[in-house]
Amino acid sequence: MTIVTHEAGAPSGAAPSSGRPAAEPAIVTRGLTKRFRGGQVAVDALDLSVPRGSVFGFLGPNGSGKTTTIRMLLGLVAPTSGEHALLGLPLAEALPRVGALVEGPAFYPYLSGEANLRRFDAADPTAPAATVRRRVGEALDRVGLTAAAGKRYRNYSLGMRQRLAIAAALLGPRELLILDEPTNGLDPQGTREVRTLVKEIAAEGTTVFVSSHLLAEVEQMCTHAAIMRAGRLVTQGTIASLSGGQAVRVRIETPDAAAAVAVLTALGLPDVRTVGPAGPAGPVAPDVRTAGPAEETGTEVTRPGGRGTEVTAELGGHAPERINAALVGEGVPVRGFTVVRPSLEDVFVGLTGEGFDVDG
Ligand SMILES: Nc1ncnc2c1ncn2[C@@H]1O[C@H](COP(=O)(O)OP(=O)(O)OP(=O)(O)O)[C@@H](O)[C@H]1O
């Protein structure tokens, strides 16, 4: 199904100033619930708060309720209970300021991108006919399709097709753009184009609410995220704060794990462990030396396992560069030094005890 909301008579150009405090969330839901006729609860008491100016990733495995939520937000399906507001306004007032892309609009293959957009624009009775050329031109420009405006749609790449769909949602100034799985079905190049476009649109001041079942995509593209599972909200917040619930760790690769353990322990880093070829993962007491005979190779002491052993510890608020300096200062041969930040997948697994299964 294709739904693109249209501008209701607002002038073309910059996004209209709402006159409301900038801090007011772009989307708020309270107890939003959808129970389908068969009894299936697709969305269960959802409390979302999407800050203005954010690129908000609405993340969840297939079937977790993302599309149903978006349909409720846009007034396309009635909630069973609960409430929501877009831009702090009643829905009828908000929708003209909202661009939306749900499952992709149908374009005529034999028409050019520009002609297709004109068709979309013409379907909106509130869009002033006198300014159609400018409106369509600006939308094409915004998605980087000006040079391909006259090319037939059927000759567009997958990425260009999706950018045109986003242009259709941007036929007019928008304060909020809602995109349902905009990279679904795209090749890697198309995916990159859409991600870049989303970031550019956000940089211009439009709040973007984008659903995805791809954890890595949300991590790369979004400033904030909400994670859904089986219709329920698991967590929401900034990407940094979501990941902050799990400890950031340092990982050191060295042929002298024991010396590294001693330095990290002396610095007071929590949960010092050796991992890797010289022994199984596990906590290491400060005075425990890695098992196995040392052997000389040139000036280095190496232990069985070739590359050396990994030693990890929680960062615990220490500056990574100081840790590295301390290791080097104590003569620890550091072959690799990495700060490991937990991924959203770690967060999901930590909160639900389940893997993030994209097939739901
Ligand atoms: N019209 C409907 N009638 C009955 N059940 C529905 C209907 N629409 C969706 N559902 C069910 O509600 C649940 C949530 O579906 P929804 O499409 O919102 O999830 P989603 O996270 O968007 O998944 P996907 O990425 O696969 O679209 C699913 O179990 C789905 O089968």
Image (cartoon, grey):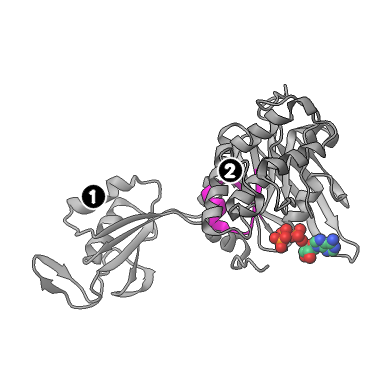
Task: Give residue 246's position: percent from left, percent from top.
Answer: 50, 55
Image quadrant containing the N terminus: bottom right
Q: Quadrant of residue 136?
A: top right
**244 in magenta:** no
Which region shows up in magenta?
209-227
Amino acid type, mark 1: Ala
Residue placed farthest to the right in the image?
Answer: 37
Q: Quadrant of residue 238?
A: top right
Q: Residue at x 16, y 74 (%)?
A: 294
On screen, 23 above or below 218?
Answer: above
Read off the residue under disc 1.
326
Mark 2 element type:
loop
Q: Nearer the viewer, residue 239 or 193?
A: 193
Q: Nearer the viewer, residue 296 or 170?
A: 170
Read off the residue under disc 2.
148
Q: Say which label, 2 or 1, has the lower sequence index.
A: 2
